[in-house]
Image (cartoon, helix red, strand yellow):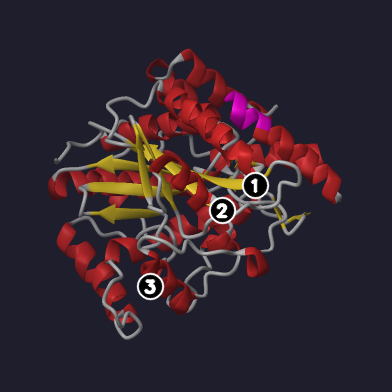
Amino acid sequence: MSYRIFEVFGVELEYMIVDRDTLAVSPVADELLKKVTGEYISDFENGEIDWSNELVNHVLEIKTHVPAIELTGLDQSFAANVQQINELLKPLNAMLLPTGAHPFMDPFTEMQLWKHEYNEIYNLYNRIFDCRGHGWANLQSTHINLPFQGDEEFKKLHAAIRVLLPIIPALSASTPVLDSKLTGYKDARLETYRHNQKKFPIISGKVIPEAVFTKDEYYEQIFGKIRETIQPYDTENILDQHFLNSRGAIARFDRGAIEIRIIDIQECPAADLAILKTVVEVLKKLVNEDWSSVTDQMSWHEDTLAGIFLDVIRDGENTMIEDKAYLQLLGLEPEPMTAGELWGFLLPEIREQLTLQEYQIISKIVGLGSLSSRISNAIGENPDHAKIVEVYRKLSDCLAANQLFE
């Protein structure tokens, strides 16, 4: 079924499965799915929320079964499924852990690919790209699928998303730690993710998508080049261009939607859905040309947007945004401000569209800092293993209770 722009929303949340005692990754997604289906298969329909496997066996995705009419209230459905999954994982001495990356996993030695249904795709991916490493084997994100009908809606939506992508990590960064130490990046997941396909740069591009605004342009400039690059390696001809495209927002013409992929998973579904609702409401303002014309939004080259994006990956909400023209795109005075201050100015613009809970959550994120900053503050500058485990155990408690980490 085809939907109009902002008519429905598809949401996907990825979680790592860890040992309840040590927090080491626990590759038992297949055993969990077997518990509820009776066999090793990839998907389980659990009412309005589905569970499914991912590339590696310590990650589980939970997602809306069909696109949702409203984002508000969805956190309760996701939280109920988190609780159910945690109960099922108890006999395996495992549980779900939030944030966009595991803080001390060694992906080069601990990675276990999904080895059941459709595993030929994952094996081929691993053969071509070598999926060991944090950007592949250690990452968990929140995806939102936003629908469009036809080139006109695609143009408006793609233009708005490209403009907003660079500053989203200022709200959503949750990955300051890899390999048991602070990385120097608020969003280390995205810093590693953007290097995933360095062997084939066309696959992820600059992460910020190119300025293409029709289906034909997209197929010519992005999909066509991806297929041409990968064809000699895809000897079985089983890799789909939608699946290969690793930009931060990807056009899913097969489902009539654009999927935003740069959002780190948070400490609980309430935070995830509040961030998604905020992003959607700001995108509506851009699409409606409340602050700038679609023509102006379309004119931005991916290199310029990627420059802002890379700064925000590193410094998060503390990033100084000095590009006056970029600030004016968002209806702001052309005076330098931090990315956190920018979101602070945008929040009143969408206040009426947020519930009290959503508003309070985003206000806390803007006021207290991203989850990445809160984690960094909690573990200190030179954390030992015990301190990391202590803090991330509190994060697992936040996930189980659907509460913010403060």
Q: Amino acid at mark 2?
A: His
Mark number, residue 202: 3
264 shown above or below 353: below
Q: Residue at x 65, y 64 (%)?
A: 110
Foreground mark, 3 or 2?
A: 2
What secondary structure is the stretch in magenta mostly built from? helix
The quadrant where residue 4 appears: top left
7 shown above or below 327: above
Mark number, residue 58: 2
Give the labeled residue for mark 1. Answer: 18
Disc 2 residue crowd, few under 14, some 14–19, many 20+, Cα 10 Å: many
Foreground mark, 1 or 3?
A: 1
Q: Do the numbered discs 1 and 2 sit on residues whose CB atoms are within 8 Å?
A: yes
Q: Residue furthest bottom?
A: 232
Closer to the camera in the image, 4 or 74? 74
For the residues marked 1 and 2, what is the alpha-carbon distance in whole angstroms? 7 Å
Q: Amino acid at mark 3?
A: Ile
Disc 3 residue crowd, few under 14, some 14–19, many 20+, Cα 10 Å: many
Q: Is residue 381 visible?
A: no
User: Magenta residues, as a range?
Assistant: 397-402
Residue 273: x %, y % from top left: 46, 30
N-terminal-most mark, 1 or 2: 1
- The quadrant in which the N terminus is found is top left
Residue 31: x %, y % from top left: 51, 49
- SS state under label 3: helix
Q: Amino acid at mark 1?
A: Val
N-terminal-most mark, 1 or 3: 1
Q: Is residue 133 visible?
A: yes
Closer to the camera in the image, 296 or 27? 27
Q: Residue at x 43, y 34 (%)?
A: 276
Q: Residue at x 66, y 35 (%)?
A: 396
- The quadrant in which the C terminus is found is top right
